[in-house]
Amino acid sequence: MFHLVSGLMAFYICWRLVWPASMAPGLKVAITLMLILVSQHHLITRQFGSMASPEIPGWMLMVLGWAYGTILITSCLFLVIDLVGILAYPAAKSVGATLLDSSSGLRPGVAIAIMLLVGVGVWRAVRVPDVRSIEITLPQLPAAFDGYRLVQLTDLHASRLLQRPWMAAVVAKANALQPDLMLLTGDMVDGSVADRIDDVAPLRELRAPDGVFAIPGNHEYYSDYRPWIAHFESLGLKVLRNEHVRISQGDAAITLAGITDPAAARFGMSVPDIDTALAGVPPDTTVILMSHRPSGAEKHARAGASLQLSGHTHGGQIAGLHWVTQWANQGFVSGLYTVGTMQLYVSNGAGLWNGLPIRLGRPAEITEITLRAARTDNAGD
């Protein structure tokens, strides 16, 4: 379906922009073939590795991402204008004609603006992310944990696009925050252990007094799951798979739990099981749950989670198109949500899949979370 939709986007651009244009027939054919090839580059480049991780140079992934992103945004823009023209033909006729007619002098300018915009989006996708700091109040949080700090890293997606120098810079920024607990919520890699072993080596340097914990995301299952879990453990990451650990501060304690990803079902492995993950946890305990996907939040809240930390959505990557991602993830896409008695934080992620390396209005992040205990009625008296 993905490749079909990509091809339809290319054909739509050809129909609306290329074929009506005043140019030599041979040039029209050449541009049409180029657009079709770019729209199908995921199908082509997977021959050099996999769709999740084509083993081609990073600069080539950026160029292909820029070209594909230009097709995506151009087709969406012109589709919106066409729909406006259909729904409000008399009022929108002049707008549609100005932007879409083959005789329009604005058309080349619009095309150049889109290409420049997508170029900025590619740059923002591959730069080292900034830190986003937030505070989250949890009603049952023990007073001893008031001010407790977590760093969440998610969707690192180590690949030929985001290699060792990028990963080392992310690790350095995360460590500089000096959190109490370091959490990696899935999609850390694209590709096999042999292909990515050098790129993920900096993860060994992650430090936090109460430990560095991780869970698998869907891309771990696409990329040699079992060898990767063993390798993560060798790097000092404790991978939680439908299980929990106790984190103590003096006599007080909270629970950290982690579940697997639904992609496990495709590979005959353990699917997410919140009941198993929280088995034996007292009902009045503050539970921080790592779940790669935000979906399932309502079930997790009913099971007793106090705070769910997720990624997977990349924040939608492109403002406006993020609504599609939001729809596909039960209404969750970026930021803090209240789900029943639970707080859900969905990080935009530090990296992203190399097949669409674009961020526009949905910036990457390293997330610093400070936990706050709820104030009592006599607090401050």
Image: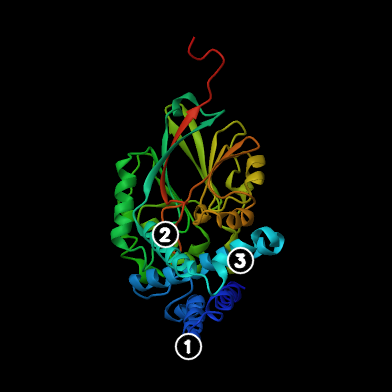
Secondary structure at numbered mark 2: helix
Q: Where is 116 relative to 331, above or below?
A: below
Name the residue at 60% across, 72% down.
5
Tell which residue pokes out farthest to the top in this image.
Answer: 381
Q: Residue 54's image quarter? A: bottom left
* Residue 22 rendering spot, x and y as whole percentages: 50, 82
**What is the three-letter code of the residue carrying label 3?**
Leu
Q: Is residue 233 left or right of residue 21?
A: left
- Graded by Cα atoms within 10 Å as few (under 14), some (14 to 19) or many (20 or more), the crowding at tag 3 reads some
Q: Nearer the viewer, mark 2 or mark 1?
A: 1
Circles 1 and 3, Cβ within 8 Å, touching? The answer is no
Give how far across and how far down residue 37 sits, in percent. Answer: 49, 81
Please provide percent x and percent y for residue 152.
Answer: 43, 46
Front residue (pair 347, 28): 28
Label 3: element kind: helix
The percent coordinates of residue 301 (x first, y second) are 63, 41
Q: Which residue is mark 1?
A: 24
Q: Earlier in the sequence, mark 1 or mark 3?
A: 1
Q: Is residue 355 visible in the rendered structure shown here? A: no
* Image disc number at residue 79: 3
- Could one spot residue 227 in this view of the protein? yes
Disc 2/disc 1 C-alpha distance (Å): 32 Å
To which residue does mark 2 refer?
121
Q: Quadrant of residue 344?
A: top right
Q: Is residue 184 left or right of residue 331?
A: left
